[in-house]
């Protein structure tokens, strides 16, 4: 496989090395850009941020995104823009994976591994969401648009999908307060079903911290706050990276 990859990279390098038919100035710029590239052309050096708007976002999703995104900036008396109390958290579709015993997973598994909530190629098909955190108020808000692949009861979102998002939001919030953490307990009460395809708010609030333990409350509501869909409490425990590496 290493030889095949080497031949593939060599092939791409030979393609990029073909003489340019453009003017010498363009050829010079082209050569300079190639020298500054850190990876071969077929591979992107910039991961996609899945928390940014895409074509699948509905009007309500976009409206709430703009509302919270505007809170990320604060205008001073001199009409200058400064960082506000809220911050949008970027979201990617993979993270570094470790196996127990301090051994990396195989390169093949690493290359295919994807975060559970970001593993759909089609925008809007499953978990479509964006998170905003307010460290001053110790709050986190998630705007979730539930895609058609999350169906449980006919026409409504699967309870496991709701639990996944609650764990994602509260876990992200806890990691902002004392990273890294792992979920120790998640207690969920379902109040009313969430219609498939609808947009909801998932709000996470810090209850208290006791040593390595972080207690968080969470609720899932309609975007206007008139209906409570789900409420939950979560407990997270701070860990060290060596805990993951050693699998203990």
Image (tube, grey):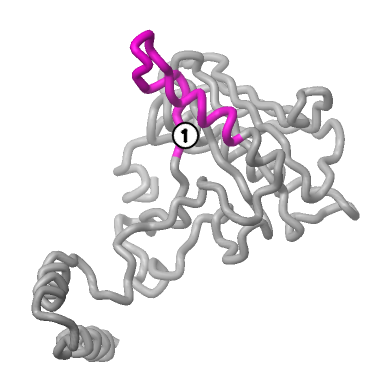
Residue nearest the observer in this picture, 115 or 7: 7
Residue occupied by mark 1:
88
Judge whether 45 appears above or below 196 on screen: below
Q: Position of residue 145 (x, y in %)?
A: 69, 45
Label 1 residue SS: strand
Q: Residue at x 69, y 31 (%)?
A: 187
Judge whether 243 appears above or below 114 on screen: above
Report the residue that reaches farthest toward the top: 77
Q: Position of residue 159 (x, y in %)?
A: 77, 45
Q: Position of residue 244 (x, y in %)?
A: 37, 47
Please give the range of residues in magenta: 65-89
Q: Position of residue 235 (x, y in %)?
A: 56, 28
Q: Is residue 99 magenta?
A: no
- Quadrant of the rendered structure where residue 7 is? bottom left
Judge whether 123 appears above or below 214 on screen: below
Q: Is residue 70 magenta?
A: yes
Q: Residue at x 82, y 23 (%)?
A: 226
Judge whether 27 appears above or below 142 on screen: below
Q: Residue at x 32, y 71 (%)?
A: 43
Q: Give the side of residue 169 with respect to residue 238, left or right.
A: right
- Quadrant of the rendered structure where residue 216 is? top right
Residue nearest the observer in this picture, 88 or 116: 88
Quadrant of the snapshot with the C terminus: top left
Q: Give the side of residue 105 with respect to residue 56, left or right.
A: left
């Amino acid at each position: 496989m290493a030889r095949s990859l080497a031949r593939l990279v060599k092939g791409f390098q030979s393609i990029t090395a073909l003489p340019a038919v453009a003017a010498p100035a363009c050829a010079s710029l082209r050569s300079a850009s190639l020298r500054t590239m850190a990876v071969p052309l077929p591979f992107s050096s910039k991961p996609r941020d899945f928390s940014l708007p895409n074509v699948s976002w509905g009007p309500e999703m976009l409206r709430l995104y703009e509302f919270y995104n505007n809170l990320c900036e604060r205008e001073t008396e001199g009409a200058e823009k400064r960082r506000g109390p809220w911050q949008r958290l970027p979201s990617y579709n993979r993270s570094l994976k470790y196996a127990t015993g301090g051994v990396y997973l195989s390169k093949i598994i690493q290359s295919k591994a994807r975060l559970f909530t970001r593993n759909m190629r089609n925008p809007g098909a499953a978990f479509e969401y964006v998170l905003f955190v307010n460290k001053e108020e110790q709050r986190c808000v998630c705007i979730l648009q539930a895609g058609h692949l999350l169906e449980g009861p006919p026409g409504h979102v699967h309870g496991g999908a709701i639990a996944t998002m609650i764990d994602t939001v509260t876990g992200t919030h806890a990691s902002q307060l004392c990273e890294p953490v792992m979920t120790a307990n998640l207690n969920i009460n379902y109040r009313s079903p969430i219609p498939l395809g609808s947009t909801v708010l998932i709000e996470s609030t810090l209850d208290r911290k006791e040593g390595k333990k972080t207690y968080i409350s969470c609720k899932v509501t309609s975007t206007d706050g008139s209906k409570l869909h789900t409420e939950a409490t979560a407990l997270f425990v701070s860990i060290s990276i060596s805990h993951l590496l050693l699998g203990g």
